[in-house]
Image (tube, rainbow, N blue to C red):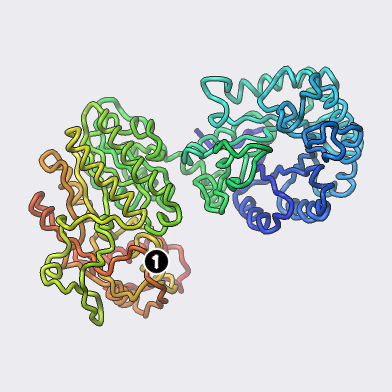
Amino acid sequence: MNARLHPARSGFGFVEWFRPGEYGRTEDVLPEIVASGATHLRTHLSWAEYLAPGGEEWFDWLLPKLSAELDVLPCIHYTPPSLSRTGKATGAPRRLKDYADFVDHVIDRYGRHFRHIELWNEPNNLLDWDWREDKDFSLFCEMVGGAAYWVQKRGWKAVLGAPCPFDPAWINLMGQRGVLDVVSAVGFHGFPGTWDSDEGSWNGWDLHLGELRRIVDVYNPGAELWVTETGYSTWRQDEVEQVRRFMAALSVPADRVYWYSWRDVPHDVAVQEGLWFDPRHYHLGATEHGGRPKLLARLLQEGGVRRVQELFTLAKPSIASSVAPVVITGGSGFIGSNLASSYLREGRDVVIFDSLARPGVDSNLAWLRDQFGDRVHSCIADVRDAAQVRDAVRDASVVFHLAGQTAVTTSLDHPIEDMEVNVRGTLNVLEGARAAPRRPGVIFASTNKVYGALEDIDTVATAKCHQPADPQIARNGIGEDRSLDFCTPYGCSKGAADQYVLDYAKSYGMPAAVLRMSCIYGPRQFGTEDQGWVAHFLIRALRGERITIFGDGHQVRDILDVDDAVAAYRALHANVGRLSGQAFNLGGGPSNAVSLSMVLAEMARIIGEPVETAHEPWRTGDQLYFVADTARLQAATGWQPTIPWKRGVLRLARWLQAERFADAPAARQRRLSA
């Protein structure tokens, strides 16, 4: 599916309701919408709110603010209760002409800020228009028809508010009553996959808009068709599907399309009177209500519609029925893309299952496609989507489950999402593999965080690092016989998933095993402050930026080059039948045990100048010391690390210089020391 605008229009819009007094929210949201590439904005100008205390001042500020950046479509609805026949905002005004008079006032006061004006919203919906008091819509037709006539007379263009749900008979009634004669556009609302069922009442954009076009052409062939609301709720965390629905909406045969909405609604705000109960209403945004971009917002802000289209041209889920591919969840990530490359170089077919939620990882997928072409089969989906997982692993020869929420800090901020991704996602993978005909082996990427903060291990502080007082631990590291002690939501979720994998091997006889990883680093890593610290440090050092150290910088980790990590995953896969039901530590071991300060000193040597640092307090769950004892893995598979940490860090620095800084100004290019 191509993310291309329909030839009948240019640009697309968002719907965003701004409530009176939301000055700060408006200031935050408006530049985000502009950065998305949107050209239009549909918002409401509530008649009831305008006449409430402070209403004039609010809209005097809001409309000029919005129209300075976007083509604004104000939707005028909601009767002031004092003027309503029912005493509610959904009732018809006692004097129907009052609505037209208010529209005329809006044109006088704000007309320079818009060319089109929408008359009411969802008039066949009881929550917006009380049709119980207007069963034949005669009041509505007189009210809106008169206002539309006056809008046209004044030289502006009226848009008829869309019925929701879509009702062809209602549209035809508007034609018979003469309303369609005096409007320039007719609205349409459609939310396929959210409220309407693709198998039920929703019959597709072409059919519904075609039906609308046939009715409108009878009364006013020159009127345009506008999709004034469409969207997709991510209440099931399916951000990828939201992007797909957005792409589909771009190509609908309408003159304008408005996507509902830019931001989620906070859970403590009623979407409509009495509606706090339906979670779908609260997750329609391209960003969360706190501002965190979902996949759709991130892609649009990275490059607009073109960026969305680029991403989904990478998707190629089809695969020959006779092929038993390697399936890698999280296959566009750092370890996943390196692991995929190792199999693809041997001529294997690989299914990359990835939600692309982590910024930058789609470049890894593009790299794989460029290098290996049609043997890369990408499935852009989330591991929380059980059906997608089941389809992806159906023919697998092996499943490497690397997808997950990977940061302790994120788990502390969003523990429920962390649990759903890491625990539920892993169960979906296990169930999919259990149902697959070939009974593929499952290799799970766990973490050393399952051992907790290790606060009971006494350490001795030296000038460079914290060392265990126990000579055996200092010599060998932490072994798998260490008791599990889940710490932080991330440790709990990964630990629970770890145990599920081991139990499925026992309870169902599945070939499944676990690798509990230390710090892996290397090419194709997009490190952040919260995860992937070696790459994060190098990126900031190469930019000449300050690096934040949490704690004293003497905490010790055994870092492992990704090529060695890939070799370990493959070695475990080769022996998974014999080693099923077992967990193994994976890290650089004592020979690659380093403190953060030691790594920073080596980075300074590589780039040829000091690295600036700043210190912050210790973070929850941070271990003073973790070095993996990998003796069990070595004995069971013959694997061992081969790349010394200094050589690996230099290799990563050179890759980052070539890939991330190749287009940087000459002043930023650095000569890296060997």
Q: Quadrant of residue 200?
A: top right
Q: Residue at x 19, y 35 (%)?
A: 507
Q: Quadrant of residue 606?
A: bottom left
Residue 8 horizontal side relative to residue 662, left or right: right
Quadrant showing the C terminus: bottom left
In the rendered image, residue 224, in percent from the top left (x then y), is placed at: 74, 30
Tell me: residue 666, above or below residue 347: below
In the rendered image, residue 390, in percent from the top left (x then y), is placed at: 33, 31
Q: Residue at x 48, y 41 (%)?
A: 239
Q: Is residue 285 visible?
A: yes
Q: Residue at x 82, y 39 (%)?
A: 81
Residue 505 horizontal side relative to residue 167, left or right: left
Report which residue position mark 1 lands on.
Answer: 539
Q: How many numbered circles does the render carry?
A: 1
- Closer to us: 672 or 359: 359
Residue 192 horizontal side relative to residue 42, left or right: left
Question: Which secondary structure, mark 1?
Answer: helix
Q: Badge 1, how many Cα within 10 Å: few under 14, some, many 20+?
A: many
In the rendered image, residue 519, in percent from the top left (x then y), is placed at: 27, 61
Residue 101 horizontal side relative to residue 344, left or right: right
Tell me: residue 462, above or below residue 190: below
In the rendered image, residue 12, in percent from the top left (x then y), is placed at: 65, 41
- Closer to us: 626 or 266: 266
Callout 1, which amino acid? Ile
